[in-house]
Amino acid sequence: MEISAKMVKELRDATNAGMMDCKRALQETGGDVDAAKEYLRKKGIAKADKKADRATSQGLVGSYIHMGGQVGVLVEIACETDFVARTDDFKEMVHNIAMHIAAAAPAAVSREEVDPSLIEKEKEIYAAQMRDEGKPENIIEKIVEGKVGKFYSEIVLTEQKYVKDPELTVEDYIKSVIAKLGENMQVKRFARFAIGE
């Protein structure tokens, strides 16, 4: 059976699971949405968002230095217990996210950390471009909102396409690890250093 984007979106809206997890669940269940929900529940992915309010007072600070020492990253990722922080899966995730930050150079962990004046400036630029192209005022706002959303997906860590699997966002990748290890996890902060920047 052909799994449509609409089916994937509906399952994602219902479960908050990642897109690829939803697609996989639908493929495994022959397109049966209810069975796919059950599949995700069994896998634990649908529960990842329910863990988001749990306190994260443990974790690790990880580092990654790109070959040649030209780019370096420190990242703090928190979890609920020191037991999980010591697991190979958690350590691997910390390393992978540090490597992603080195490659993708995000500006912030989340939208809330992005300077509002930067977003206003981008909106002004996009609106001016649309006016120059002769777009009607009534649709400029919608176009600008779409462009701002794309801008966030380029500069916000959790919304960026994960470099090791561009089918996922970094948030989707983190949720997959949450589902596997059964604890809330959050990227708290990071610092990226590059020679000449």
Image: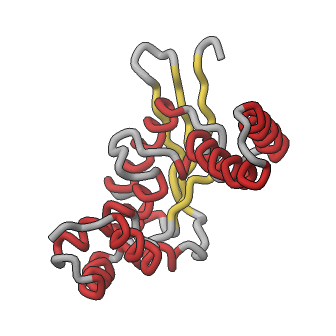
Determine the residue positioned at 43% across, 64% down: 175
- Does 71 appear above or below 82? above
Determine the residue positioned at 42% across, 45% down: 162
Q: Residue 168: give x, y in percent of width and height.
A: 39, 52
Q: Which of 59 and 137 lies nearest the eye of the viewer?
A: 137
User: Does 112 sit left or right of 166 as displayed?
Assistant: right
- Does 191 appear above or below 7? above
- Does 9 appear above or below 196? below
Q: Residue 15: give x, y in percent of width and height.
A: 42, 78
Colour setting = secondary structure
- Picture quarter with the C terminus: top right
Residue 37, quarter of picture: bottom left
User: Does 135 sit left or right of 93 as displayed?
Assistant: right
Q: Which of 88 and 32 lies nearest the eye of the viewer?
A: 32
Q: Residue 103: give x, y in percent of width and height.
A: 47, 30
Determine the residue positioned at 53% across, 26% down: 72
Q: Residue 185: give x, y in percent of width and height.
A: 51, 63
Q: Which of 46 and 117 lies nearest the eye of the viewer?
A: 117
- Picture quarter with the N terminus: bottom left
Q: How many marks?
A: 0
User: Does 65 sit left or right of 87 as displayed?
Assistant: right
Determine the residue positioned at 57% across, 48% down: 76
